[in-house]
Structures are given as structure tokens and as C-alpha cells.
Image: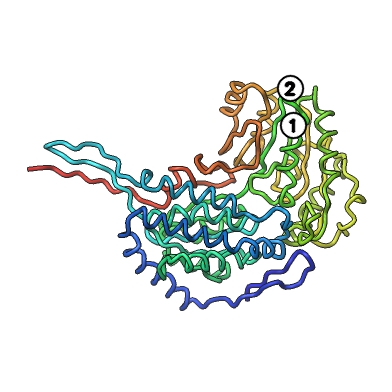
Amino acid sequence: MLRCTSPINGDIFVERELQSRTELDHVVANARVAQAAWAQRPVSERAGLVNAMVTQLESMNDDIVVELAHMMGRPIRYGGEIGGVKERAFHMTSIAEWSLMPDLIEDSDDFVRYIAREPVGVVFVVAPWNYPYLTAINTIAPALAAGNTVVLKHATQTVLAGERFAQAANLAGIPDGVFTNIHVDHDTTADLIAARSFDFINFTGSVGGGGAIERAAAGTFTGIGLELGGKDPGYVRVDADPAVAAETLVDGAMFNSGQCCCGIERIYVHESIFEEFVEHAVNIVNDYVLGDPLDQATTLGPMAHVRFAEEVRAQTAEAIAAGATPLIDPAQFPRDNGTDAYLAPQILTNVDHSMRVMRDESFGPVVGIMSVESDEEAIELINDSDFGLTASIWTNDTTAAMNIGNQIETGTIFMNRADYLDPALCWTGCKNTGRGASLSTLGYTSVTRPKSFHLKNL
């Protein structure tokens, strides 16, 4: 059985029976048969059905928001993920025809030469629990629009999200076999991948999980896209407004209880405005309300599982033992009893890179803040990381931001914003953050393959 334990009270919220290998082999075979007919439909028709699926998801949003609170603890006051899902899906379908158009090299009396883009076939999406709709749609939308069929395996913690996608696809009129949600464990997932059941795999999750996917796919020559998280930095330059920077960076660190792949996990501030920045940050965090995510007054819900909270508690305790200064009094957040998934937010100063809280992915409501003397010091510290997803630079000097950005090892550079995904730009990373690209026109390269046509007229 797959069992989702609710972080609200520790009770089992939903459970589903695992599918047998025979059932799963049938799912894959059905998807492969359905793909041939689906690929023959015009791009505009496929894109229209993807849009219809998203519209059906939107009609379920009131229920989805409550389900998310029960499954992974996000407060209902934030309204779920449908706004971002629509933004990403509708952008990808709007650029589908142009992105999939053949690249014409020559059209003369002698030759017609062009590069076409064909769907890869069956796309396997392995989605995470922290943003169960936003992360999944990044691949689902372009994969379907490009003419692939999709098999979705969702995280156990958010198992209902996969079922909602399947329900929406059915209501939108997407044909049988074109989109399928499955209930499967890790071992069977690995077996399916090793059996070359899929033509492209997109995985979002931990570094360990990404390694397991790569090992399962070894020797199959199956394309893989991996987004494996980050340790994303914010840098507040000498010319920045510390109050404005604190408002966004603190939200980027604490929203969704810090459970964001591109959330802010470490902040570097120029020494001349360090104290002012920290004061603003502490005031912001002290105004949070930790509590039941079903309560509209709650601004910070529990983490998705007690074991995630335990990891953040461990990193924080280790840092304090090594000399870090905690600036938030846990007594202000009495819902944190030290044993369950409810975790008080924390800001740490007097931190350094010898501490796990500044190096390992925390994925929780804690952030370390360091004072720096210069851009050069900030760049060195930012690059002293095994991850590279996004970096947020706060400055009034665009040229400086670009120069700094050119020296940072990361996938996206933000200036004066953070923790956001622009679907017109490529979503990618480097180092342990993974490999591959989603969204933008480049998002179609993973789910298609090039075919060259060299036609000589006689």
C-alpha cells in the first residue's frame, strides 16, 4: 500500500493499493499504442486539450487546496498552485507550434533540407510532493503538446495530485492511454525504467533519488531530466534597500515552510547594511503564525513529514552548538513541540560554511545570514556549494548584477526578486542540482528528437 500520513495530526489521510507489474506493463503498452494516433493530431488540437485539462484542474481547485493542506501542510490561505499551473501550461501551449516547427535550411530547385522535431514516445514524469502540481506541469504540458503520451508517478505524500491530473485529463477529453497516473513503489519504478519502458524520464526530487533514476536507466540510453533541489543564495549589495530585500528574501526562505527547490537557504549581506537587514528579517519572521493549515489565520503550516522537520532541527542544533546565534525565540511559536512536523522558523547569524545549515539542503524554515565585505567575497561564498539552481542579487545596478551573474555557477540569476519561475525562460541547474532543461522553447527539446531531411530533386 501507498500511505500518505497527514502532517496536521499524524493520521493516515489517504492510502492506495500498489499496482502489479502486469498492470503496469499494460499501462505502458497502452500508452505506446495511443501515442501513434495522438502524434498524428495537429499541434493546435493537442495544445487545446492540454489547456482544457488545466481548466478542469482549476474547477477542482477549492477541493485541491484542502487536500494539499492535509497531505503536505500548506496553509489554505494561499489558494494552492493553480495560478502558476495556468501560467506555465498556457505559455508552453502558446509556443508549441513555433517551438515544434521544422528548422528549414534550404528550399531550392535542387534541395529541400530541414530538421524536424518528433515526439520521443512515452514520457515518464516522477513528481515531488512540495509543489505537486507546479513541478509536474512543467513536463506534462510540453510532452503532451509535442505528441507524446505521459505516464505520471506522483509522490506518496501527494498521491491525490496524480489522481486529480488523471481526472482532469479524462474530463478534458484527452484519449485513453495518452495520460495515465500510476501507483507504484520505488523498486518497481526502477524495474520499469531498467526495462526501457519509457523514452524520456523527468524526475524532480532528492540527489539520492536522482542517482537511483540514473542507475536504473544505465545502459538503456533513455533520456533523463533531473531537478534535484538547491541551496539557493541571496546577495544584498551595498546599494540595495535592506528592508525591500528582506521582505522578498525572507518570504523566499520561509514560504511553504521552506520546502521549495528554489527557496532561499542562505543570505549574504554587505557589512554596511547587515544589521539593518537582519533587524527587518527578524521582524518579518516574528509576525508569522505557525499552526493548523486549515485555519485561515495560519501563515506557516507544518512540514510535510516529521522526518523532514527532524533534519532541519538537527542542522539548526548543530549550527548553534558550533557558535551560530539563533535570533527567533521558539517560545513565540508554541505549536512547535519539538517532536512533530510543526517547526518554528529560525534565522541564524554567526554562521559559516563549515556548518551543514549553510551547505546541505535544509528544505525547511531556517536561513543563515552572513556579512560580506565585497562582491568578490559574496561570489566566492555563493559558488562554495554543491548546488546551482538559482541566485538572487539585490542591487540598483543592472550592470553589476549581470557581471556578478556571469561569475555565479547556477541555472537562473534573479535581480531584485527570488523564488519564482518564469515559463518563458529555461528552468535548469548545474552541479548536484541535476541536468536538463524544462519550460521555454528549450523545454521542447527534452521531449522531442531531431530528424534531418535531406531531399534532392532530380
How are the colours assigned in the image? rainbow
Residue type beneath disc 1: Val
The span from disc 1 to disc 2 (Cα, nearest Å) is: 13 Å
Which SS class for mark 1? Answer: helix
| Count of marks, rendered view | 2
Residue 454 located left or right of residue 302 = left
In the image, residue 210 lies at what x, y percent? 56, 55
Q: Is residue 192 visible?
A: no
Residue 205 located left or right of residue 439 = right
Residue type beneath disc 2: Val
Closest to the observer, 455 or 90: 90
In the image, residue 272 lies at what x, y percent? 80, 22
Closest to the observer, 70 or 78: 78
Residue at the location (43% across, 47% down)? 94
Q: Quadrant of the C terminus?
A: top left
Residue 188 located left or right of residue 69 = left
Which SS class for mark 2? Answer: loop
Residue at the location (39% across, 59% down)? 148
Residue, far front? 59
Q: Which residue is the site of mark 1? A: 244
Q: Is residue 1 above or below residue 259?
A: below
Residue 443 located left or right of residue 271 = left
| Residue 268 image-quadrant placement | top right
Residue at the location (86% across, 57% down)? 336
Q: Is residue 56 visible?
A: yes
Q: Which residue is the site of mark 2? A: 238
Residue at the location (38% across, 44% down)? 99
